[in-house]
Image (tube, helix red, strand yellow):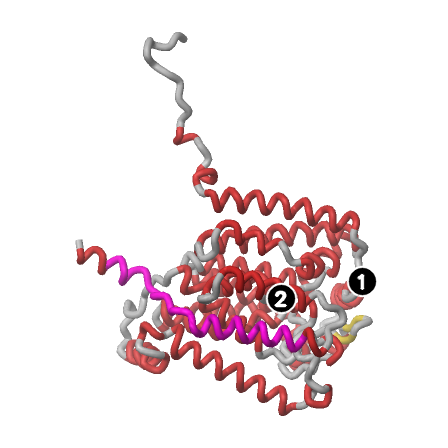
Amino acid sequence: MALKPGRKLQPSRSRRPQIFKNPKAAFALALIFMDALLVALIIAYVPYTKIDWDAYMSQVTGFLGGERDYTNLKGDTGPLVYPAGFLYIYSAIRFITGGEVYPAQILFGILYIINLSIVIFIYVKTEVLPWWALILLSLSKRVHSIFVLRLFNDCFAMTLLHAALATILYQKWHLGLILFSGAVSIKMNVLLYAPPLLLLMLKAMNIYGVISALACAALVQILAGLPFLVSHPIAYISRAFNLGRVFIHFWSVNFKFIPEPVFVSKQFAISLLIAHLGLLATFAHYKWCRHEGRLFKFLHSKVTSALSSSSSSGLKILKEEHIMTTLFAGNFIGIVCARSLHYQFYSWYFYSLPYLLWKTHFPTSLRLILFVGVEFCWNVYPSNNYSSALLLCLHLLILWGLWSAQSEYPYVEEKLSTRKKEK
């Protein structure tokens, strides 16, 4: 077919993949691909270090053998202390891998890339970081080790949590709470996100919506633990949700400089709990509820609307940036006040670290110094007085940066309606 004179062939812009129109998204895809290659090289050439894998398999063996009493599910590192979701996940892993380490490493390598992809999606959607800073998400030696050289259950818990956060960005609160509860059923550390998450739910929904979402989360826990709740409920609840565990001082990365008698004391634990609750209340009152007239006025308005039986009041759309800032900061407060952070616990907040640093008013150079400093502390083995004291100082400096930063306006719909009125 001949072309008409004067007519030129031009590429159709509409046929171009949308991803290439967003430089940050294109860079993110390249980053994921390069990190996948790095993970493959680590699995192939870096020796695996066995820590909890044999214990996991022993606990799973007991479960698959019909044991439903949590006091009898043990491994070479001690009794089982994780909720039932852990058993289901690692039972599936054992079925797929036959309990062998190398195929499990490949599985965890895939999990690492899935988790990284979800986290990068969150960062691209919130647009807090410049495109080049996304590379920080792939630069942690410790996190690579946690996923593909240690095979910890923290990896599955955090991946499911990040999936919940991505869902919540779309205001899908009920689905988000189901995924969140699923993450809790693997490891309890996810509950550090619970206080800020509850506050966001109260902002976004009326009291009936909050109750129904919480009911969905509770149902997940009941269904996950049902085989154990029916047979040995006290053993399951006391072991799987033990909030009074005392960790070994030697493995502490953050409070190694505290003398061991003080570290294991109940007074130290209570002091940290008070600090945790106090910081959460302070941030909620002065930062997260600043535009609602502070925390107590906001809670009073929610109670008033609930008593007035107004089903439509309080339904608002939250800004994505406000959602992630509140959730990441709330979790970070829990990290700062945790009595003991073991090496695998770095995965609890590493992926939020670049976001939090860019939410401070610090210059970029200081942000990068803080990032490198935190990573350095987590790679000192064994931790010592100096590395743990340095880590605490870095945490406190980041927390101060978050406190002194300007609070963003939390709502979308009110801002849009205001613009329409102005037009």
Image position of 272 (left or right of 401): right
Horizontal and vertical percent position of residue 284: 42, 77
Can you tell which mark lies on residue 373?
Answer: 2
Earlier in the chain: of badge 2 and badge 1, it is 1
Is 387 situated left or right of 102 in this image? left
Kind of residue at badge 1: Lys
Question: What amino acid type is highlighted by mark number 2?
Answer: Gly
Q: Is residue 27 left or right of 141 when viewed as pictured? A: left
Q: Where are the magenta residues, as a range?
A: 388-417
Above/below status of 18 relative to 248: above
Residue 123 x, y percent position in the rendering: 49, 55
What secondary structure characterizes most of the magenta part?
helix
Q: Is residue 90 visible?
A: no
> As rendered, which of 188 and 267 lies closer to the eye?
267
**Label 1, on which residue?**
50
**Residue 83 lies in quadrant:** bottom right
Residue 403 magenta: yes
Give how far apart the Cα atoms at labels 2 and 1 are: 27 Å
Q: Residue at x 22, y 57 (%)?
A: 419
